[in-house]
Image (cartoon, rainbow, N blue to C red):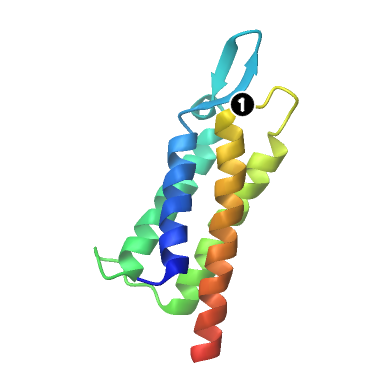
């Protein structure tokens, strides 16, 4: 498996896990990601993982290279933008993992798509 695909898988999984972690913490009181916008990032991460599995030949979905890269970039952008929008002075570990996961995911998807365009 290409390194970019591994990064897509790891970043998507980290994003999914981050939805269940604290996104904000004030005076010892935390708010989990799934209590807010973490639901959006969790759904995007799960869709990304399903799409990756299909691209690798598992399951009923078998997207083409360009479709795979384009959708993965779009999902990563949703995650990164959501993470950036929810970043506050009270940010906790979950929001940072979401933001960094979305950025890494997007870069890896762009690298994967770029290699597709170079090879045909």
In the image, residue 6 sits, relative to residue 90, either above or below, namely below
Q: Residue at x 24, y 65 (%)?
A: 58
Q: Residue furthest bottom?
A: 120
In percent of width and height, residue 110 lies at 58, 69
Q: Residue at x 71, y 39 (%)?
A: 85
Residue bearing mark 1: 92
Q: Residue at x 61, y 37 (%)?
A: 96
Q: Is residue 44 visible?
A: yes
Q: Please identify the quarter of the rendering in which residue 20 is found.
A: top left
Q: Describe residue 68's horizontal placement relative to residue 104 as left or right.
A: left
Picture quarter with the N terminus:
bottom left
Q: Describe residue 80's horizontal placement relative to residue 117 as left or right.
A: right
Q: Nearer the viewer, residue 50 or 94?
A: 94
Q: Residue at x 44, y 41 (%)?
A: 16
How many marks the image carries: the answer is 1
Q: Residue furthest right?
A: 89
Q: Please identify the quarter of the rendering in which residue 6 is found.
A: bottom left
Q: Please tell me whether mark 1 sits on a helix, a strand or a loop.
A: loop
Q: Nearer the viewer, residue 50 or 112?
A: 112
Q: Is residue 120 visible?
A: no
In percent of width and height, residue 29 lies at 59, 10
In the image, residue 6 sits, relative to residue 11, either above or below, namely below
Q: Nearer the viewer, residue 74 or 104?
A: 104
Q: Nearer the viewer, residue 50 or 106?
A: 106
For disc 1, the neighbor class at 10 Å (few under 14, some 14 to 19, many from 20) is many
Q: Residue furthest left?
A: 59
In the image, residue 28 sits, relative to residue 106, either above or below, namely above
């Amino acid at each position: 498996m290409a390194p970019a695909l591994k990064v897509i898988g790891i970043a998507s999984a980290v994003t999914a896990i981050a939805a269940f972690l604290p996104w904000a913490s004030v005076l010892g009181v935390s708010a989990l990601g799934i209590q807010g916008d973490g639901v959006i990032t969790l759904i995007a991460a799960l869709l990304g993982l399903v799409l990756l599995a299909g691209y690798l030949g598992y399951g009923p979905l078998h997207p083409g290279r360009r479709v795979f890269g384009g959708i993965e970039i779009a999902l990563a952008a949703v995650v990164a933008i959501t993470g950036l929008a929810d970043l506050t002075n009270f940010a906790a570990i979950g929001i940072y993992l979401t933001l960094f996961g979305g950025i890494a995911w997007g870069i890896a998807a762009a690298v994967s798509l770029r290699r597709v365009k170079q090879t045909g």
